[in-house]
Image (cartoon, rainbow, N blue to C red):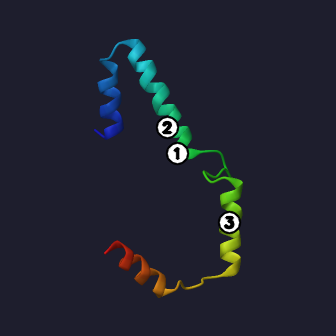
Amino acid sequence: MGKIETAIKAMESLPAHRREEIAEMVLELAEAIKGAPGRSALSEEQLAEIRRRRAEGFKPGSTSRIDQLLARLA
């Protein structure tokens, strides 16, 4: 028996109002995971920033900045 079947069997022993609560939570979770087609968890501003950075290409950072940070933390 798989996990889904085991969970359903366990739910069957619960009172009806608890089964309904669990069913609502599972449906909400499934919808949140699935999401609407084309819907992103990112805001439009975040998506615009990603597009901007991709268009610019990769720019290696300055190693001196890491050295400065490490010096401050020491």
The amino acid beneath tag 3 is Glu
- Give me the disc on residue 49: 3
Q: What residue is pinned by disc 2?
A: 29
Type of amino acid at the residue the image marks with label 2: Leu
Nearer the N terminus, badge 3 or badge 1? Answer: 1
Q: Is residue 16 above or below residue 55?
A: above
Q: Foreground mark, 3 or 1?
A: 3
Image position of 59 (left or right of 19): right
Q: Quadrant of residue 31?
A: top right
The crowd level at tag 3 (other Cα within 10 Å; few <14, some 14-19, many 20+) is few
Residue toward you, 56 or 41? 56
Direction from residue 41 to residue 5 in the image, left or right:
left
Residues tagged 3 and 1 counted as in contact (Cβ below 8 A): no
**Residue 17 image offset from top left, x and y in percent:** 42, 13
In this view, 43 is above or below 70? above
Three-letter code for the amino acid on which mark 1 is drawn: Ile
- Dot 2 lies on which element? helix
Q: Residue at x 66, y 75 (%)?
A: 54
Q: State the image quarter where residue 2 is shown.
A: top left
Which labelled disc corresponds to residue 14?
none
Q: Secondary structure at mark 3?
A: helix
Q: Position of residue 13 (x, y in %)?
A: 29, 18
Classify residue 52 as left or right of residue 8: right
Local crowd size for mark 1, using a 10 Å CA cut-off: few (<14), some (14–19), many (≥20) = few
Give the Cα distance between marks 3 and 2: 29 Å
Q: Which mark is residue 33?
A: 1
Residue positioned 38% across, 75% down in the render: 72
